[in-house]
Image (cartoon, rainbow, N blue to C red):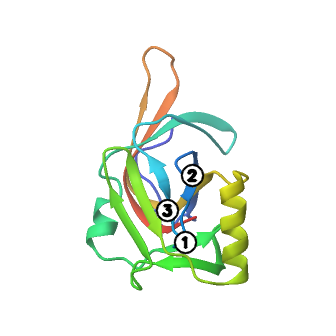
Amino acid sequence: MPDDTIDMDTAPEWRTFAGELRAEGDEPKIEGYAAVFDAPFEQEMMGWTFTEYVRRGAFKKTLSDGADVRALVNHNADYVLGRTKAGTLRLKEDRTGLAVVVDPPDTDWARDLLTTMRRGDMDQMSFAFKIVRERWSEDKDTKRVVRELQEVKLYDVS
């Protein structure tokens, strides 16, 4: 099990969650969850595996600080779907997780993305982050290492 002290200068991490992604209506809008709270996520890092959970409140500081978070296509900064500072991306923590609402731009690539989503070919969202506070433990029943993301700095949702 890793040491509880974490190098804060590590590269960003990404997590992907399935489901709850919608692109509906005449007014283009993308809605879904970039993270789901308390759902187990099997992770492999540097040759060992562990179970990870995003805990409620993990995004609270980033959201309350007014950070300029972007909604991107596949974490690619060339394809910005929305930004919190522009009001075209809205984020909030609710009982389920990190809820996302995006007003995508009227561009060819964004219209193509919406078509792909409506067909059901794209049905996941993810988030890029850096650890601020985490907790490592061992599940006594399964003997699996458990990582709890308690606070993260959110870079983007995708």
Residue placed under numbered mark 2 in the picture: 15
- Marks 3 and 2, Cα distance to the nearest angstrom? 9 Å
Disc 1 and disc 3 in contact, CB within 8 angstroms = no
- Marks 1 and 2, Cα distance to the nearest angstrom? 25 Å
Q: Which of marks 1 and 3 is nearer the N terminus?
A: 1
Q: Quick one: which residue is furthest to the top in this view? A: 141
- Name the foreground residue: 30 vs 75: 30
Mark number, residue 129: 3
Type of amino acid under label 1: Pro
| Position of 140 relative to 117 (above/below) | above
Q: Quick one: which residue is furthest to the left in this view? A: 64
Give the side of residue 29 with respect to residue 124, left or right.
left
Looking at the rendered structure, the secondary structure element under dot 1 is loop
- Name the foreground residue: 69 vs 134: 69
Q: Earlier in the sequence, mark 3 or mark 2?
A: 2
Type of amino acid under label 2: Arg
Residue placed under numbered mark 1 in the picture: 28
Type of amino acid under label 3: Phe
Q: Residue at 69% of width from left, 51% of height from top? A: 120
Place of residue 63 in the rendered image (x, y in percent of width and height, measured from the top left): 32, 67
- Marks 1 and 3, Cα distance to the nearest angstrom? 27 Å
Crowd tier of the residue under label 1, counting other residues whose Cα lies within 10 Å: few below 14, some 14–19, many 20 or above: some
Looking at the rendered structure, the secondary structure element under dot 2 is strand
Give the side of residue 153 with respect to residue 63, left or right.
right
Place of residue 29 in the rendered image (x, y in percent of width and height, measured from the top left): 51, 68
Looking at the rendered structure, the secondary structure element under dot 3 is strand
Q: Residue at 49% of width from left, 75% of height from top? A: 103
